[in-house]
Image (cartoon, grey):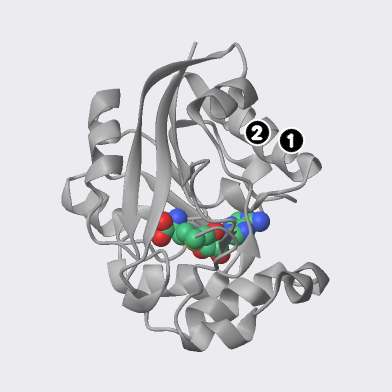
Amino acid sequence: MKGESCNINDKGKSCCSTTTEINNEVNLKEHWDKAYLNSPEDKLGWYETDHSPMLRLILKTGLNKSARILNVGSGSTTLVDELLNKGYSNIIATDISEVALKKLEDRTGSNKVEFIIDDLTKPTKLKKIEPVDLWIDRAVLHFFTEETDQKIYFDLLKSKTQSKGYVILAEYNLSGAELCAGLPVHRYSKEMLTEKLGADFELIDSFEYIYIMPSGAERPYIYALFRKK
Ligand SMILES: C[S@@+](CC[C@H](N)C(=O)[O-])C[C@H]1O[C@@H](n2cnc3c(N)ncnc32)[C@H](O)[C@@H]1O
């Protein structure tokens, strides 16, 4: 698994075949827009319909259905459909890819979701939103391999999570692959996530979870739920 790419699909290999090419790629927005344009959604290397690990942690927060939920790096995830079906009514989906968000908007067609195109490593619109009750991230933080980008991400998370609010992070764990969607990743343990969040956040629950890609390959994740003090 080491060094192996979880490319978007077989065709996706051509869009980002080596790490060197990726490092030279200046436009990440374009990279992600292409990923969503070049593949059917259910063939994307991160596509899933079983959201039970995330839903288990969301349920554990005890938040009510009108809680303000921010899904960062949401892409076109069906988690949003699932939350709407369960009655959650105050959701923000944000992503660098406008193609992904457009797909999500067209599919859900809901006025209960706000869509924000922004870059988590250079946030502008996100800096202006009101704090949220729940910050959800599946598979975006692990793309930030530079310490400066990680700091910007965690500063935003800390300032935009309400006091007594919750954070769920689901990222490649230490035994996971070193590339995802053809990009290098920074893998995490629950201890690393706890350290990044700092003393204002308490770890409530965590577990490891093996995600099975549409190709059948396994990708081990760490899921962790935190509460802000
Ligand atoms: C592996 S996908 C996961 C998508 C979604 N969370 C899911 O579980 O299906 C990573 C997502 O992060 C988004 N992304 C990557 N870099 C980003 C950045 N700097 N700011 C915001 N979104 C970003 C991509 O466009 C993509 O939708």
Question: Is residue 110 in view?
Answer: yes
Q: Quadrant of residue 34?
A: bottom right
Residue 34, compared with residue 125, is above or below; it is below
Q: Amino acid at mark 1?
A: Lys
Query: What's the distance in space between the residues labelled 1 and 2, CA to CA?
Result: 5 Å
Q: Position of residue 76 (x, y in %)?
A: 41, 66
Give the quarter the ligand 1 occupies: bottom right
Residue 64, numbered circle: none
> Between 162 and 34, which is closer to the camera in this rendering?
34
Q: Position of residue 52 (x, y in %)?
A: 22, 45
Question: Is residue 118 in view?
Answer: no
Q: Position of residue 228 (x, y in %)?
A: 49, 17
Q: Residues within 10 Å of mark 2 (few under 14, many from 20)?
A: some
Tag 1–tag 2 contact (CB < 8 Å): yes
Residue 16, compared with residue 28, is above or below; it is below
Disc 2 secondary structure class: helix
> Between 58 and 42, which is closer to the camera in this rendering?
42
Q: Residues within 10 Å of mark 1 (few under 14, many from 20)?
A: some
Say left or right for 2 vs 21: left
Q: Position of residue 120 (x, y in %)?
A: 65, 50
Residue 151, numbered circle: 1
Q: Which residue is mark 2?
A: 154
> Between 25 and 173, which is closer to the camera in this rendering?
173
| Residue in the picture at 30% in, 25% down | 61
Q: Amino acid at mark 2?
A: Phe
